[in-house]
Image: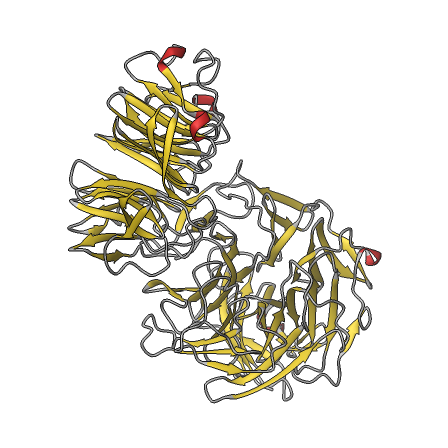
């Protein structure tokens, strides 16, 4: 699979390369092609599968589709029709695409649920109703066009048999005689009275005597036009729905929890061996002489994660995973040695190795307690990576920086022992405040842990915890801080370490923010100072227009930036001052190596370059906004000039500056640098013009900039804004008017 979809767009402002990564593992429909292959619409575009050769890597269409998520498809000769989740109906003929939206006769907001071929036409069901057409254009089949016969506002499923078209709609099931004109009211039959309360979202037709409706309410069969009989009732179970039907030699099959076969009225049995226990299938189809399902979902109601396909082989289900990102809903991002770690909502901790692609740490692949709500990831000076499953504690994973999982170590730390998890999960009782982990951050070799939920009031002791040491040897030290120590609120939104001894804390539920200044050791509370005071938070009385604070960053002048529910603010002279021109909600932000502030808002990504504000929306960029306001995250990779933003629909990247090159003749000396002994200098045969050296932590955090008229005059004492940097390796970007060079600096104290 292609690791990142790169979209090249020309802008008048900074970015030129956008990338978007999302999950293609949730299969929404299966279509058998006449050439013996099969097509799949997925949560991340279109995939093509050849049983002889596997997934066709050369045919991936998310970068070409008008929308990344596909609900349904139809293939005929040279035409590929795709029903998308937000970009209308797409048609690919040859190597070109065209899009049909409301302007071309597909009513609604661009969400197309179903595409079907019948009666010599293409039929599309959308959130705006029904339309009929071909490659030239479409006409809406609404109440006015049908003489009042068809009154539905949304069509979610389409099927046909024996010249009759069946439609699943928001007003129940309709049928249309394809041998008559759809503009004649007599050609329509409404099954609204019998079906509107059956939870039918799709239809399946085998013959005129075997027409079925299915969805969240289970399965119903049409007996007469005014009578439908329920065969499988899920109306009282919100997480048990039917996603597909298939008529086989063994009778009627349903994809729901596992795959089930109809035995007799009211009796269903699990079909086939080996399907993962208590998991769902997302669709059902027959192709390449096999029965196929969308395989092994934790929750069929969300397309955030999937597991690809499964097929039946001699009575046993066999998995055909889709490679790539396992889940689209992603959270905290950590970069380490070229490896990308990303928290997720449904898929556990997702990891991308530069030479091997994606893999996932969760309860199905590793000895983790859970897969759901694995929000966090962070790296400290110790080996391995930290993460946490909400309600299931803090987990440390040492993956040895290798794609294989055979040599990995996984340890979970809990305040109270977890029940109902695999006995293989290694649980260590630790002085955490509770088992809820919201986010993580590293400072001076220690790990900061934000505890308790940020969307409701905690009902237990909560706050922040610091831990340091070597997990594998068991030599860990823990320190907690709660409201008894001076914390203003229990429910933590964000932690942002600044320098060696400062930690900015944002609280949920309009709780404002607070600054903790400690002595440089997060484990030592003896020198703690709380600002604006113990138990107090910065809010609108300190200059903020909103007490809803989501994120922090540090600009190139060393000032703290705060992203809020109504704009971007800079902390200066003991007050917050709003940055003019940015008034929207700022969910996460980063400062690049040019000093520009990049903000992810509710409807756009905003670039602040001094007084110039550039906003990137769906109208001038590939960016697709998402409404989630739980906790978005971002990081900046300065050596590649690349920004990462997480969202509910996937992982965005923007290359804001081409990666800088290393210069073999540029040296920092002495190395390692001991600030107590002398200053750091540069030796170089390059330009004698003015240079700027910007330093970043390896996780992308901007530290500061040192300028000089030439490299010979340049020096650094090991501190920024009066704060000493801690021991470690830092990335330096050396910039002149016409070049940027990267190097690393080792500091030892």
> Image check: 352 left or right of 680?
left
Q: Position of residue 170 (x, y in %)?
A: 47, 30
122 w.r.t. 431: above or below: above
User: Where, by quadrant of the figure, is residue 590 drawn?
Assistant: bottom right
Q: Is residue 638 left or right of residue 210?
A: right
Please state which of residues 297 and 710 is positioned toward the viewer in this rendering.
297
Q: Quadrant of the N terminus?
A: bottom left
Quarter where residue 194 is shown: top left
Nearest the camera: 308 or 246? 246
| Residue at left offset 28%, top offset 23% | 118
* Quadrant position of the C terminus in the picture: bottom right
- Farthest right residue in view: 541
Residue 395: horizontal and vertical position, in percent?
49, 74
Residue shown at 61% from the left, 63% from the top: 690
The answer to whether 178 is drawn above or below residue 539 in the figure is: above
Q: Is residue 55 left or right of residue 142?
A: left
- Can residue 59 be seen here? The reply is no
Colour pattern of the rendering: secondary structure
Give how far across and how far down residue 704 sits, in percent.
64, 68
């Amino acid at each position: 699979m292609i690791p990142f979809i790169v979209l090249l767009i020309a802008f008048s402002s900074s970015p030129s390369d956008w990338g978007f990564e999302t999950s293609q593992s949730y299969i929404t429909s299966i279509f058998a092609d006449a050439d013996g292959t099969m097509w799949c619409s997925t949560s991340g575009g279109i995939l093509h599968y050849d049983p002889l050769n596997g997934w066709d890597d050369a045919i991936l269409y998310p970068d070409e589709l008008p929308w990344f998520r596909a609900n349904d498809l139809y293939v005929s000769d040279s035409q590929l029709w795709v029903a998308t989740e937000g970009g209308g109906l797409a048609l690919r003929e040859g190597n070109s695409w065209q899009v049909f939206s409301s302007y071309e006769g597909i009513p609604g907001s661009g969400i197309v649920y179903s595409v079907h071929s019948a009666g010599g036409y293409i039929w599309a069901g959308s959130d705006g109703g029904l339309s009929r057409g071909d490659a030239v254009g479409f006409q809406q089949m609404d109440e006015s066009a049908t003489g009042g016969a068809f009154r539905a506002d949304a069509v979610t499923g389409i099927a046909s048999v024996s010249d009759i078209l069946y439609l699943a709609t928001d007003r129940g099931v309709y049928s249309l005689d394809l041998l008559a004109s759809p503009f004649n009211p007599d050609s329509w039959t409404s099954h609204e009275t019998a079906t509107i309360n059956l939870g039918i979202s799709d239809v399946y037709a085998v013959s005129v005597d075997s027409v079925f409706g299915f969805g969240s309410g289970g399965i119903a069969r049409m007996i007469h036009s005014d009578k439908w009989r329920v065969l499988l009732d899920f109306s009282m179970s919100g997480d048990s729905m039917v996603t597909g039907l298939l008529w086989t030699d063994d009778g009627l099959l349903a994809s729901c929890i596992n795959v089930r076969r109809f035995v007799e009225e009211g009796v269903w049995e699990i079909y086939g061996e080996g399907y993962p226990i208590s998991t769902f299938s997302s669709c059902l189809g027959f192709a390449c002489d096999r029965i196929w399902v969308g395989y092994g979902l934790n929750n069929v109601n969300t397309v955030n994660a999937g597991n690809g396909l499964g097929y039946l082989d001699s009575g046993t289900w066999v998995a055909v995973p889709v490679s790539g990102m396992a889940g689209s809903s992603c959270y905290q991002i950590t970069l380490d040695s070229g490896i990308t770690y990303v928290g997720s909502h449904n898929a556990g901790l997702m990891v991308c190795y530069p030479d091997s692609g994606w893999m996932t740490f969760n309860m199905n692949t590793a000895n983790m307690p859970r897969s759901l709500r694995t929000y966090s990831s962070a790296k400290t000076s110790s080996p391995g990576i930290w993460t946490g499953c909400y309600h299931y504690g803090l987990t440390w994973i040492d993956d040895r920086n290798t794609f294989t999982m055979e040599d990995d170590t996984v340890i979970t730390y809990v305040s109270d022992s977890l029940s109902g998890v695999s006995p293989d999960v290694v649980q260590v009782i630790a002085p955490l405040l509770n088992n809820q982990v919201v986010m993580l951050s590293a400072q001076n070799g220690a790990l900061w842990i934000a505890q308790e939920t940020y969307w409701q009031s905690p009902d237990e002791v909560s706050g922040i915890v610091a831990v340091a040491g070597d997990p594998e040897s068991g030599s860990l030290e823990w320190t907690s801080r709660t409201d008894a120590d001076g914390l203003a609120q229990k429910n933590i939104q964000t932690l942002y370490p600044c320098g060696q001894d400062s930690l900015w804390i944002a609280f949920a539920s309009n709780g404002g923010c607070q600054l903790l200044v400690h002595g440089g050791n997060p484990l030592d509370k003896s020198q703690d100072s709380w600002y604006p005071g113990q138990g107090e938070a910065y809010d609108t009385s300190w200059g903020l227009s909103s007490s809803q604070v989501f994120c922090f960053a540090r600009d190139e002048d060393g000032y703290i930036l705060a992203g809020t529910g109504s704009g971007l603010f800079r902390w200066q002279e003991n007050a917050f001052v709003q940055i003019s021109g940015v008034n929207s909600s700022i969910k996460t932000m980063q400062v690049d190596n040019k000093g520009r502030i990049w903000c992810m808002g509710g409807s756009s990504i905003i670039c602040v370059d001094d007084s110039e504000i550039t906003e990137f929306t769906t109208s001038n960029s590939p960016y697709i906004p998402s409404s989630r306001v739980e906790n978005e995250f971002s990081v900046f990779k300065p050596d590649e000039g690349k920004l990462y933003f997480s969202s509910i629909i996937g992982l965005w990247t923007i290359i804001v500056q081409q990666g800088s090159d290393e210069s073999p003749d540029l040296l920092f000396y002495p190395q390692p640098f001991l600030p107590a002994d002398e200053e750091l200098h540069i030796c170089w045969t390059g330009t004698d013009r003015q240079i700027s050296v910007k330093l970043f932590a390896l996780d992308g955090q901007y530290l500061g900039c040192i300028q000089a008229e030439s490299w010979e005059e340049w020096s650094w004492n090991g501190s920024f804004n009066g704060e000493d940097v801690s021991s470690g390796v830092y990335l330096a970007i050396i910039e002149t008017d016409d070049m940027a060079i990267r190097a690393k600096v080792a500091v030892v104290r």
